[in-house]
Amino acid sequence: MPSASAPPRTRRYECGVCWAVYDPAAGDALWQVEPGTPFEALPEHWSCPNCAAERRTFLVLDDD
């Protein structure tokens, strides 16, 4: 059980085409997305930096 002072976990997303992972903690250097940017805040035109798949192909990565 996380402590009350622990920061909330941000969800990572995985491309359903090439399995590349978008990690909000890292951002996306190719698209000039700053670290700390949640997936939901990515620009509409953002696509997978590895295979150019659209955002809609990404699935929540279960880290549990």
Image (spheres, rainbow, N blue to C red):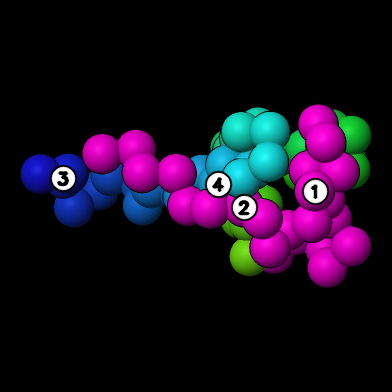
Residue at which label 1 appears: 53
Mark-to-mark CA distance, 4 and 3: 24 Å
Mark-to-mark CA distance, 2 and 1: 8 Å
Instruction: Look at the numbered discs 1 and 3 and tell me whether their residues touch, using CB distance below 8 Å.
Output: no
- Which residue corresponds to the image point at 78% horizontal and 43% vertical from the top-left? 48
Q: In which quarter of the image is residue 55?
A: bottom right
Q: Determine whether, in the image, residue 31 is placed left or right of residue 8.
A: right
Q: In which quarter of the image is the C terminus?
A: top left
Q: Does the magenta stretch include residue 49?
A: yes
The answer, for residue 23, to whether it is visible in the render is yes
For marks 4 and 2 on the same chain, the one whose residue lies earlier in the sequence: 4
For marks 4 and 1 on the same chain, the one whose residue lies earlier in the sequence: 4
Instruction: Look at the numbered discs 2 and 1 and tell me whether their residues touch, using CB distance below 8 Å.
Output: yes
Disc 2 marks a residue whose amino acid type is Phe
SS for tag 3?
A: loop
Mark-to-mark CA distance, 1 and 3: 37 Å
Residue at which label 3 appears: 3
Residue at which label 4 appears: 13
Instruction: Look at the numbered discs 4 and 1 and tell me whether their residues touch, using CB distance below 8 Å.
Output: no
- Which residue corresponds to the image point at 68% horizontal and 41% vertical from the top-left? 17
Residues rendered magenta in the picture: 41-64
Q: Quadrant of residue 45?
A: bottom right
Mark-to-mark CA distance, 4 and 2: 6 Å
The secondary structure making up most of the magenta span is loop
Q: Which of 55 and 30 is in front in this view?
A: 55
Q: Position of residue 7 (x, y in %)?
A: 36, 47
For marks 3 and 2 on the same chain, the one whose residue lies earlier in the sequence: 3
Instruction: Look at the numbered discs 4 and 2 and tell me whether their residues touch, using CB distance below 8 Å.
Output: yes
Disc 1 marks a residue whose amino acid type is Ala
Mark-to-mark CA distance, 4 and 1: 13 Å
